[in-house]
Amino acid sequence: MRLTGRTAIAALLAAGCLAATACAPGTAAPAGDRAADDRTGTLKVWLFNEAGNAAKEAVIAKAVTEFQTSHQGVTVNVSYIDTDAAARAAKMKGAFNDPNSAPDLVEFGNTDLPGYVAAGGLAEIGTELDKWKDKADLDPVIARTAVVDEKTYGLPWWVAVRALYYRTDLFAEAGLNPPTSYAELVAATQKIHGAHQDTFGIAVGGKYTFGALPFVWDAGGDIATKDGATYKASIDSPASQAGVKRYTDLFGADGCPAQQCADLTGGKTVDLFAAGKSAMAILPNSSRSKVDAGPVKGRYGVVPLPGEKAGSIAPAFAGGNNLGVMKAAKHRTLAVEFAELLASPAYQEQMYDAMGNLPTLKSVSGKVAAKDAFLKPFTDTIAAGTKFVPLDQAWAQIDAQSVVPTMLQQVVTGKADVAKASTDAAAQINSAFAAH
């Protein structure tokens, strides 16, 4: 599953849990049910059915054969589940409430983790992963996306980040190099739009949370920070407000006019750039195929999104998918071992070749970047340090209520200044944390 829709499933699952006590923590099988930990029989695995899934299935089939060969008496049964948010939420809720229908191992979006942990559906596997031979190769920041309350509930399988796509032809015509600072980015939008009035300087969106957050993080701000055992909103801090201002300032006449861009999502910014209607856009590595299918194919490049300081890289959101063991698993050890095989260097590289998934292992990231120059800006972004949303089940509510997009839209449409919009957003964020 790509970045779109991940938080939607968490929101749907959380809403279901609030509405029905059957989804409350503790409804999954108790710890004692794991005592059998069968080492033979059928290992049930649920993976996402994605676009181009045949290539993924071919890689998984090889892993299954290898695993069954090295584990006599074991059959691996892989099912590919619908990635539609509502369908996945219903399927996962059913698995949490009925251990007999649950898989042993499941693939899930990393932003779904807090809701799944709150529902009591996932097993803590930190002790097993501490012994994994490839653990030291796992990017430590990405590893944190599988941790809730200092307990590990998953193995990061692949990651996706955003970088700055730019039109090489328009930059060359303007005598510009790709921007290496926020100031250079702004100057480029102004110069290119001045020469091409029908082209936006940059495509940004009022509904593009993960396009805006790098500016907040680069300024030293955040959505929320840990305050003891709980989170407290920090989107209204001076640093966060500075980052919000930098992003929303891009919605001017030279960049992306508010009347045309206030309602844009991340997906719509991809469409704008791919159609040749903007000089720059903040897009994930997975947008490559969409851009190459449009008129700008062969006329664009990618660099890391620059921060305010010249030569710096703004922190990107570390989206991606994890592999988790269900608390009700009857084959816990086998599930962990199969997850470790899928996340091993060999299979992470094969999954990149098949699906374009960026590896979570540092050595493999370097290897795939060396053979595909397109990836270097993304792997450089990961190496510079990524960020994540609050690992709390309240994030599902915050995301479902469009708290961050509403704040951005209030500013870019002139309905509120940054101080007022961020203060209102902070109040909503704190209410969500208080409710959980």
Image (cartoon, rainbow, N blue to C red):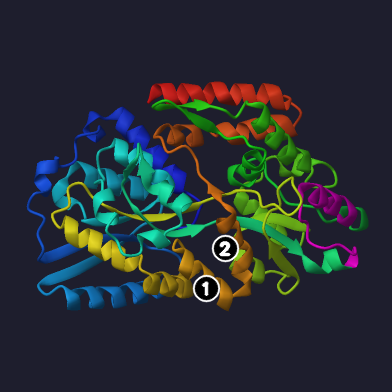
Mark 1 is on which residue type?
Answer: Val
The answer to which of 86 and 143 lies nearer the viewer is 143
Magenta range is: 173-192
Between discs 2 and 1, the one toward the N terminus: 1
Mark 2 is on which residue type?
Answer: Thr
- Measured as percent of width and height from the top left, residue 65 is found at 24, 78
Total numbered labels: 2
Residue at 31 percent of width and 64 percent of height: 133
- Measured as percent of width and height from the top left, residue 330 is found at 13, 54
Residue 358 appearing in the image = no
- Measured as percent of width and height from the top left, residue 105 is found at 25, 57
33 sits to left or right of 166: left
Task: Name the residue carrying label 1.
Answer: 368
- Measured as percent of width and height from the top left, residue 52 is found at 45, 70
Q: Quadrant of the C terminus?
A: top left
- Classify residue 280 by image quadrant: bottom right
The answer to which of 70 and 383 lies nearer the viewer is 383
Task: Name the residue carrying label 2.
Answer: 379
Q: Quadrant of the N terminus?
A: bottom left
Label 2 packing within 10 angstroms: few (<14), some (14-19), many (20+): many
Q: Main secondary structure of the magenta part?
A: helix
Does the magenta run of residues contain 187?
yes
Residue 116 appearing in the image = yes
